[in-house]
């Protein structure tokens, strides 16, 4: 039997296609949100009604030029009516830049200079939160 040798262009295209959908690939950053730190310094300030908050996180990657991406960020689930949120949630974010070389390996030289920014937000702040508070009978 003779061995079939794939066309290098076809192989690179297949690898690139697989890289966009495979989590273990270095093109993606996986972060695991646990929760707040122990002790009073880890508590989120109460934002809604009597001593509660409905907290979620929005995660961004920041490139070397200071640009945040993705534009809307990646949001966690909300932890309702607590000042000590615990998410225990995995969030996966695609890194910008990089390419698949002739060897078939993905290289991303900008990954080392990319930083992570996490915003902690109350879900009920603003007009929507006010209306939700009325419906809950604050």
Image (cartoon, grey):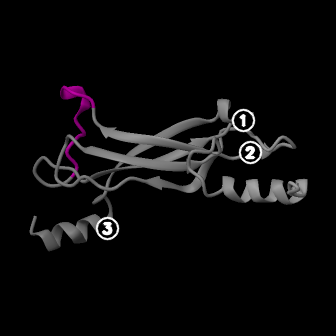
Check whether the beta carbons of the residues at disc 3 and disc 2 lie within 8 A of each other: no
Instruction: Tell me: residue 51, above or below residue 4.
Output: above
Q: Position of residue 41 (x, y in %)?
A: 24, 27
Task: Name the residue carrying label 1.
Answer: 110
Residue at x-position 17% and y-position 47%: 82
Circle 3 crowding by C-alpha within 10 Å: few under 14, some 14–19, many from 20: few
Q: Earlier in the sequence, mark 2 or mark 1?
A: 2
Q: Earlier in the sequence, mark 3 or mark 1?
A: 1
**Residue 43 lies in the magenta stretch:** yes
Q: Position of residue 3 (x, y in %)?
A: 86, 54
Q: Residue furthest front?
A: 1
Left-right relation of 92 to 10: left
Q: Quadrant of residue 61?
A: top right
Q: Quadrant of residue 107?
A: top right
Check whether the beta carbons of the residues at disc 2 and disc 1 lie within 8 A of each other: yes
Task: Name the residue carrying label 3.
Answer: 127
Check whether the beta carbons of the residues at disc 3 and disc 1 lie within 8 A of each other: no
Report the Cα–Cα distance between label 3 and label 2: 38 Å
Q: Which residues are magenta?
A: 37-47
Closer to the camera in the image, 33 or 8: 8
Instruction: Tell me: residue 129, above or below residue 64.
Output: below
């Amino acid at each position: 039997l003779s061995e079939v040798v794939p066309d290098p262009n076809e192989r690179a295209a297949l690898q690139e296609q697989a890289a966009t959908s495979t989590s273990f690939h270095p093109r993606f950053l996986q972060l695991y949100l646990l929760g707040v730190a122990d002790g009073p310094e880890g508590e989120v300030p109460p934002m809604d009604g009597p001593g509660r908050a409905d907290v979620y996180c929005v995660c961004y990657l920041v490139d070397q030029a200071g640009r945040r991406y993705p534009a809307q960020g990646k949001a966690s689930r909300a932890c309702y009516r607590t000042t000590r949120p615990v998410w225990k949630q995995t969030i996966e974010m695609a890194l910008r830049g990089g390419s698949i070389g002739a060897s078939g390996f993905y290289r991303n030289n900008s990954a080392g200079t990319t930083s992570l920014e996490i915003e902690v937000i109350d879900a009920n702040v603003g007009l929507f939160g006010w209306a939700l508070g009325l419906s809950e009978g604050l």
